[in-house]
Image: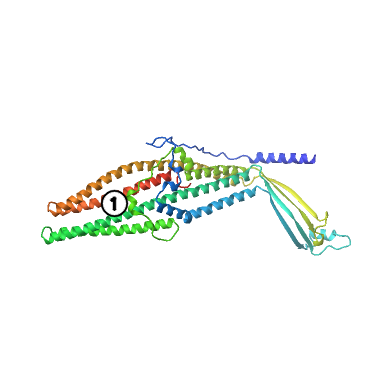
């Protein structure tokens, strides 16, 4: 009967505290959806998606594959993200332990002599532990036992905190996957840039040889009074300009090699590659699939989704602060004023059990502020989720358009190079026979050099566009 009345009293108290504390501020909320178009512009709706392929299937150059393998093992940013995952995993364990009872073992030994002019001292003087024996002075106290405390998770505040930590752990895993995707794409684009620079350097050196021969020919013609010193100086100036280009390209090659070595987590060293195969490289065919697949393939979208779910749980956690909290504490063990009496039963046995039911009253403004912040962070996470989806779609659309236009541009550049190569041959022939001015030769050689540079640059942009669309679709982290 007594227990029934106790439970009824606790229930009534809990109800009264809950009613008094449940008045929460009205806050704006934001619903989130997955608004993605049915297909990409100017593409057919096909569910085949290149992002599902592993990066070893997408990249076929063995030198590039070896470089990526090294980077996945030694890259510092990637290893830092691994520690972030470990930190998030530990946070889950911390939150899990909070809603379980805390039990500890303890022992205590103390000696105390209160003033006889105090209530405690006068009581010890008047009431003796044993008849005809004076109380020990100072009075000693020895205790040993188990002690427990437990916050009853009535409103699932602690469980939601664990779930929120688990979602953030999953978000860190997706963050690492996104780092892998970007790392592979950056290595591939830098590698193709290095091959392009090698080919541009070879073109410059060929032109230096041609221009050196042309300069010697002009000098001979000047000696034969068939041209002037002005032509000699113009040809010589062009040769110096081309040599200057050579040194600039060599510096860019060094910097690109060092960037690749940095991404691979190692000190500068030569990058193994086959520059001669650059012109034979073709952009890997890419199938974009449908935009809805981005929600599963893109690690940054999955990361934003986990963060949004965690932010929603944080609102529930903050809301639970308005409700009363029930905390139960207890202990059991042995206590005595002499070590020899410590385990004497039942005289030395001790135990305690208490329950505290507390609801916020004075600090409600602070709790309201925490609740408002949680709601604002949830709205922020919702906008970030929508922005991440929108950014992913735009990236894919831009890269798909770039692949098509770059192919058309490359075809036109190839025709331009072919025409200018013939123009160089014709202009040199006409100049030897004094039927063309030296300026025509100079301009033709300059245009031919620029067109060859542009052709190599366009090929590099084609290869990089293929890499970027693979990254944009969410490929590389599997």
SS class, disc 1: helix
- Say which residue label 1 marks: 453
285 lies left or right of 354: left
Position of residue 206 relative to residue 370, above or below, is below
Residue 459 coordinates in the image, percent (x, y)? 33, 48
Residue 91 coordinates in the image, percent (x, y)? 58, 51
Q: Residue at x 19, y 54 (%)?
A: 442
Residue 306 coordinates in the image, percent (x, y)? 53, 44
Q: Residue at x 71, y 41 (%)?
A: 13
Residue toward you, 3 or 178: 178
Residue toward you, 168 or 446: 446
Residue 338 visible in this rendered orientation of the protein: no
Residue 195 coordinates in the image, percent (x, y)? 35, 53
Q: Residue at x 55, y 52 (%)?
A: 86
Residue 186 visible in this rendered orientation of the protein: yes
Q: What colour-coding does the image apply?
A: rainbow
Residue sticking out furthest to the right: 132
Q: How many marks?
A: 1
Residue toward you, 335 or 165: 165
């Amino acid at each position: 009967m007594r227990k029934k009345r106790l439970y009824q009293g606790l229930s009534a108290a809990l109800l009264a505290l809950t009613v008094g504390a449940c008045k929460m501020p009205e806050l704006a909320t934001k619903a989130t959806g997955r608004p993605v178009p049915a297909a990409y512009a100017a593409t057919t709706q096909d569910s085949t998606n290149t992002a599902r392929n592993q990066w070893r299937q997408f990249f076929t150059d063995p030198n590039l594959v070896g470089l990526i393998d090294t980077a996945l093992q030694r890259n510092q940013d990637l290893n830092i993200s691994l520690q972030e995952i470990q930190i998030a995993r530990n946070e889950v364990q911390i939150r899990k332990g909070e809603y379980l009872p805390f039990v500890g073992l303890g022992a205590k030994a103390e000696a105390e002599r209160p003033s006889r002019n105090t209530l405690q001292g006068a009581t010890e003087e008047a009431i003796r532990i044993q008849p005809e024996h004076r109380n020990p002075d100072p009075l000693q106290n020895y205790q040993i036992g188990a002690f427990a405390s437990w916050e009853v998770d009535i409103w699932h505040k602690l469980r939601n905190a664990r779930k929120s930590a688990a979602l953030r752990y999953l978000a860190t895993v997706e963050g690492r996957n996104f780092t892998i995707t970007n790392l592979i794409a950056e290595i591939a684009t830098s590698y193709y840039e290095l091959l392009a620079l090698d080919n541009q350097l070879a073109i410059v050196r060929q032109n230096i040889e041609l221009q050196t021969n042309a300069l010697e020919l002009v000098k001979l013609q000047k000696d034969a009074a068939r041209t002037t010193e002005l032509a000699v100086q113009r040809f010589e100036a062009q040769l110096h300009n081309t040599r200057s280009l050579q040194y600039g390209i060599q510096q860019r090659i060094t910097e690109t090699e060092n960037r690749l070595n940095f991404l691979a987590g190692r000190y500068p060293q030569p990058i193994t590659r086959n520059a001669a195969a650059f012109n034979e490289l073709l952009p890997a065919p890419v199938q974009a699939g449908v935009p809805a697949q981005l929600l599963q393939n893109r690690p940054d979208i999955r990361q934003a989704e986990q963060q949004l779910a965690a932010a929603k749980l944080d609102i529930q956690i903050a809301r639970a602060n308005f409700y009363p909290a029930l905390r139960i504490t207890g202990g059991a063990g042995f206590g005595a004023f002499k070590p020899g009496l410590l385990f004497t039963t039942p005289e030395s046995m001790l135990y305690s059990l208490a329950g505290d039911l507390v609801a916020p009253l004075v600090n409600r403004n602070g709790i309201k502020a925490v609740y408002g912040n949680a709601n604002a962070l949830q709205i922020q996470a919702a906008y970030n989720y929508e922005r991440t989806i929108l950014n992913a779609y735009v990236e894919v659309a831009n890269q798909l358009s770039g692949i098509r236009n770059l192919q058309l541009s490359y075809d036109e550049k190839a025709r331009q190079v072919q025409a200018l190569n013939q123009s160089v041959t014709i202009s040199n022939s006409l100049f030897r026979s004094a039927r063309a001015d030296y300026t025509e030769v100079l301009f033709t050689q300059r245009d031919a050099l620029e067109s060859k540079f542009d052709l190599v640059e366009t090929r590099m942009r084609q290869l990089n566009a293929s890499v970027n669309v693979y990254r944009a679709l969410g490929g590389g982290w599997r």
